[in-house]
């Protein structure tokens, strides 16, 4: 089976990932979008059998797709198109949720290969609770039931990829509960835990499906928000700050809770480390300045 230059040119300029296998499931074409989606360069993948490649597909139920259950082989055998959800492994190790669409390729009435179209799923799919090893890996914080640090890091990687590919502007928010140690020392850990649970309930309920808000560590929380305009970042942060300040804790003597927030918009050539370091510094600056306030990119430029 041969691919002509015209078809290869078209496939290399599509946003969807596309790869082609021959009758033996050996990868003979790997487009540029597949390089972007998976991190695997073409010279690292072509020549490998799809079931032996570094992608390590698992299906929507977490089952590995091996030689016996390979949808590419099944499509060639049946002659039918196959669609579904899967998770593929990025070169750096994390899982990427995708839609797959597989078509058999025929020459003279015989199946000689197949093409798989890989489309990264929208951020809403991160609400799915499917992980590769659910018995050993959890994606949610036990205390608050919010996405945990691992889940947030995975989603941040996804958002950075979407920004690189489609200029999907987003903001990252770091929030820290003010004087949280006082709650634990004065009222005990159970009250401190209740503060974290109650503070996050309202925020969680008002978080859009395309966004994510979770527990980063201790009393620190991280939010990742898709924006129409960079100027909307301050509006998002103020909404979160007000939700915290308006939290009503169920005690005879009302307990006042506030939070300090840093929020920044993604920059060009951004990395996970750079954006996390910047938003953390912005949040700490707010804590030093007076607490119960927001530090934005504009504030940071003037600081």
Image: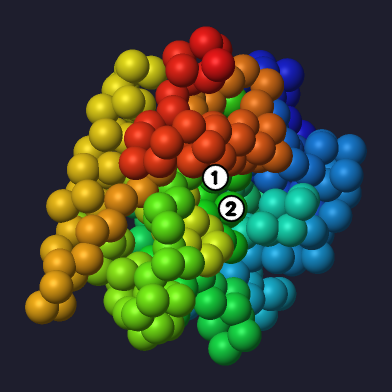
Drawn side of residue 249 relative to residue 195, left or right: left
Question: Residue 27 at what x, y percent from top left?
Answer: 77, 49
Q: Mark 2 packing: few (<14 Cα in 10 Å), some, or many (20+)?
A: some
Q: Is residue 181 above or below residue 288?
A: below
Rendered residue at 79%/59% (across/down)? 53
Residue 153, numbered circle:
2
Q: Quadrant of residue 158?
A: top right
**Pointer 1 residue:** 156
Viewer-side residue, 163 vs 152: 152
Residue 199, numbered circle:
none
Q: Secondary structure at mark 1?
A: helix
Rendered residue at 34%/41% (across/down)? 292
Drawn side of residue 271 relative to residue 221, left or right: right
Q: Is residue 79 above or below residue 132?
A: above
Gap between marks 2 and 1 measured at Cα: 5 Å
Q: Is residue 221 above or below residue 107?
A: below
Viewer-side residue, 80 vs 247: 247
Drawn side of residue 149 relative to residue 129, left or right: right
Drawn side of residue 192 relative to residue 219, left or right: left
Q: Mark 1 packing: few (<14 Cα in 10 Å), some, or many (20+)?
A: many
Question: Residue 172 at what x, y percent from top left?
Answer: 47, 37
Does residue 149 appear anywhere in the picture?
A: yes
Rendered residue at 28%/42% (across/down)? 241
Task: Give yes or no for contact between labels 2 and 1 (Cβ–Cβ under 8 Å).
Answer: yes
Which quarter of the image is occupied by the N terminus?
A: top right
Q: Residue furthest top?
A: 302
Q: Quadrant of residue 180?
A: bottom left
Rendered residue at 27%/62% (across/down)? 199
Q: Residue furthest bottom?
A: 135
Viewer-side residue, 91 vs 66: 91
Q: Secondary structure at mark 2?
A: helix
Question: Residue 48 at what x, y percent from top left?
Answer: 85, 55
């Amino acid at each position: 089976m041969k691919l002509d230059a015209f078809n290869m040119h078209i496939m290399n300029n599509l946003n969807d990932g596309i790869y082609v296998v021959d009758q033996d499931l050996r990868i003979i074409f790997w487009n540029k979008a597949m390089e972007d989606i998976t991190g695997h360069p073409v010279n690292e993948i072509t020549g490998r059998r799809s079931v032996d490649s570094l992608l390590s597909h698992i299906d929507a139920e977490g089952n590995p797709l091996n030689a016996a259950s390979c949808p590419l082989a099944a499509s060639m055998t049946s002659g039918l198109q196959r669609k579904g959800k899967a998770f593929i492994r990025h070169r750096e190790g994390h899982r990427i949720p995708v839609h797959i669409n597989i078509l058999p390729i025929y020459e003279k009435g015989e199946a000689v290969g197949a093409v798989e179209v890989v489309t990264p799923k929208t951020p809403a799919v991160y609400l799915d609770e499917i992980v590769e090893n659910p018995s050993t890996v959890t994606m949610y914080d036990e205390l608050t039931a919010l996405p945990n640090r691992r889940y947030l890091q995975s989603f941040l990687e996804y958002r950075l990829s979407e920004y690189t590919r489609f200029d999907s502007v987003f903001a990252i928010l770091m929030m820290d509960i003010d004087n949280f140690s006082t709650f634990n020392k004065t009222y005990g850990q159970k009250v401190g835990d209740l503060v974290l649970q109650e503070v996050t309930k309202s925020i969680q309920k008002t978080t859009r499906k395309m966004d994510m808000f979770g527990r980063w560590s201790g009393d620190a929380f991280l939010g990742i928000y898709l924006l129409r305009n960079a100027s909307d970042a301050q509006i998002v942060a103020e909404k979160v700050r007000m939700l915290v300040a308006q939290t009503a804790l169920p005690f005879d003597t009302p307990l006042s809770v506030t939070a300090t927030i840093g929020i920044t918009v993604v920059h060009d050539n951004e990395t996970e480390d750079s954006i996390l370091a910047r938003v953390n510094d912005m949040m700490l600056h707010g804590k030093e300045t007076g607490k119960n306030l927001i530090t934005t990119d504009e504030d940071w430029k003037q600081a």
